[in-house]
Each structure stands twice: as structure tokens, then as C-alpha cells.
Image: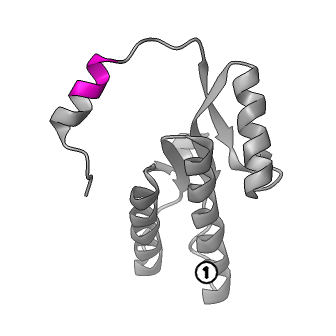
Amino acid sequence: MSTISSPGIERTLRGCRPADVDPVVIDASDLDSTAPDHLRDLKQGLAARGYQPAAVATEADLDAESTLERQREADRLRGLVRAASFLGAGRIEVSVGDAACDEVRTALAALSERADREGVELVRVRADDAA
């Protein structure tokens, strides 16, 4: 649940003005690292060139057979949520196949909660729509 009321958002938006930056979606596979030092340098480099990260996009493989593999993937995705927040991106776009099993739905729900806590919106994109 958001801690900012709708009137607070509207009041802030009234004071906004255009910025001379281009929003970009960063593909997670293009990130060399999610370490804070690397992300800080990336953020500064993008800003120097007039870019603002709007989203981080990734594909998720949460339907792995092994619980350990599924946990590793969930950990990777949590790291990307943190990276998106650090970069100032408002969204993380996660491309997933059909999430039919309970484990996948549970993992996505937990990831969504983490994203909310980090101030990032999780947007689930169907794998066939992302192509």
C-alpha cells in the first residue's frame, strides 16, 4: 500500500516542469554488475548524456524444476529491483511465461511486495508480448 495519498501526488505534479532528459529502459542483461559503485557510475554516465532510467527489463525463469534454481532466480530478481530503485527507475518489467504453478505466482507476489517497498512498480510482461 502506498504511503503517498493521491492529493499529495497531484500537488507534486502541479509543480513539475519538463526536463531535458530522455527516458530509457535498461535491459538487465546489459548491466555488468548490480554493485552500488557500478550503478552509481552508470547513473552518472547516463545523466551526463541526458538519459534517465525509466525501467529495468528482464526475463524471469521462475518455473525451474529445482527449488534451489528457483531461489537463485528470485534472488537475482530481488537484486534487479534494488538496482532499479538505486538507478531511480520507477519500474521493473519482468517478462514471464505462463505462470501456472503456485510457486511462480508466489515468487512474483513476493517480488511485487519487495518492489513496492523499494518504491518501484513491478510490471509483469508476458514472454510472448515482450518479443
- Residue at the left extreme of this rendering: 7
For label 1, the SS is: helix
- Residue at the bottom extreme of this rendering: 67
User: Going 80% across and 49% down the picture, which residue do you hit?
Assistant: 38
Instruction: Say whether residue 13 is magenta.
Output: yes
Residue 44 drawn at (x, y percent): 74, 33
Corner quadrant of residue 4: top left
Question: How dense is the environment of label 1, judged by Cα within 10 Å: few (below 14), some, or many (20 and up)?
Answer: some
Q: Could you tell me if residue 113 is visible in this image? A: yes
Q: How is the image coloured?
A: one colour
Q: Which residues are magenta?
A: 11-15
Left/right of residue 42 with respect to residue 63 in the rendered view: right
Residue at image mark 1: 71
Q: What secondary structure do most residues of the magenta stretch adopt? A: helix
Residue 96 drawn at (x, y percent): 53, 58
Instruction: Say whether residue 5 is magenta.
Output: no
Residue 112 drawn at (x, y percent): 41, 61
The amino acid beneath tag 1 is Gln
In the image, is residue 14 above or below residue 83? Answer: above
User: Going 41% across and 76% down the picture, which residue do you hit?
Assistant: 106
Left/right of residue 28 with respect to residue 129 in the rendered view: right
Corner quadrant of residue 26: top right
Corner quadrant of residue 113: bottom left
